[in-house]
Amino acid sequence: MEKNIFKDRRERLTNAIPNNSALILKGAESKYRNSDTAYAFRQDSSFYYFSGFSEPSSVMVLVNDNNNIYSIIFVPMKDKVKEIWDGYRAGPEGAVKDYLFDQAFNNSDLDKEVPEILKGKQKLFYSFGKDQDFDKKVIEWTNIANSAERHSKTIDMVDSTSLVGNIRLIKDDAEIDVLKKSCEISADAHVEIMKTIKPGQTEQDVETQYLYEFAKRGSRFPAYTPIVAGGENACVLHYVENNQPLLDGELILVDAGGEYEMYASDITRTFPVNGKFSTEQREIYNIVYKANQEAIQAVRSGNNIMEPQIISEKVITRGLVDLGILKGDPDELYEAGAHKDFYMHKVGHWLGLDVHDAGDYMEGDEFMSYKPGMVTTIEPGIYISSSADVDDKWKGIGVRIEDDILVTNDGNVNLTQKVPSDPDEIEALMS
């Protein structure tokens, strides 16, 4: 993305805090896997959103000083030796020149400079709870600033989580373009693997195929640990062992998405290992498919975000009654929450830089309404474990169908519709 995009975002955030206030955002740290071997570095999502800067141990301070707004970044200092080993560092000069910050310092100057920046401010916005050591530093800097301004009011510390998250919630055009590419990469990977899967493979074989298909299309890393669940393993919502054989006659549930230029995709498809649904598998699948399709239709600007949840729960409740798995009046069973034995999770979540992206789900005391630029998953499911009190023919069937939906001015766009979810289309693809 062009650097002006990040500068504009910083200005929008800084203008959203009151006069005579500051906001602190901390970047991510390098993390070590073992000994002196580090994991691949990934910048903190909010820090990246407002900076475009991807060096570890960096801190951003945004200041609204009586409507004079400016941005400051603290970065790793230039170091020729470290750059030989670990790569280029922008340093303070590069942070100003290349990333359009108003001021920049070495991160070794934090203790000296931040209290000076905070002196006389009325409010400090910061999201506590992510890094306890850094939380203590923020409190320390604030206390130093307070003690230096004895005749001023104590700085009021305000949680910035919702403020930052709700700006990220509405995607701009640049983000939407990247999200579309991320979803396209993952959709192509799902289609390719659905064509080739066969009994005798293992869950790990399939996971490896997904990672390869993501990577060769430009998504070096998955957006999250893939779920590759054969048979009853699909009834474990966050199953990630991915080490069992795939048996003829079973379903496989794959929840996998790649990350492209920091942005996530999130797709789930459930399909028969041998390419053909059994009668019982198709009956359960059809209920989830109907719930998925009807819930997607409710993702529209102005609609309450709980509408797809309610629709999916009612479709699944009625479908389970029709199959005799639930017994009684569908409306009464829905009100009693009977479906929760088989469909126990929410229908979706925000999607963006994080697979469970930033942004509130409530506005005041009410659930939020959809707005253009939001991206949400829609992922109903039915999970019938072997311990369920149902006929044996239903046991061990787990189905989830998940798509990524962009809210537009006049409806929505399914960013992952390229992957078949209609059961007839799945069987045709796999034949």
Image (cartoon, helix red, strand yellow):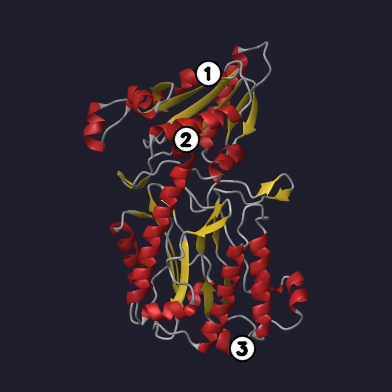
- Toward the top, the furthest residue is 151
Q: Position of residue 420 (x, y in %)?
A: 44, 71
Cα distance, mark 1 to mark 3? 67 Å
Q: Amino acid at mark 2?
A: Phe
Q: Which residue is tagged 3?
A: 391
For the N terminus, the image quarter is top left
Secondary structure of the residue carrying numbered label 1: helix
Q: Position of residue 288 (x, y in %)?
A: 57, 74
Q: In this rendering, which labeled residue sits more in front, label 3 or label 2? A: 2
Q: Mark yes or no: residue 344 visible.
A: yes
Front in this rendered view, residue 246 or 109: 246
Cα distance, mark 3 to mark 2? 54 Å
Front in this rendered view, residue 364 or 26: 364
Q: Which residue is tagged 1?
A: 117
Q: Amino acid at mark 3?
A: Asp
Q: Which residue is tagged 2?
A: 50
Q: Is residue 341 left or right of residue 50?
A: right
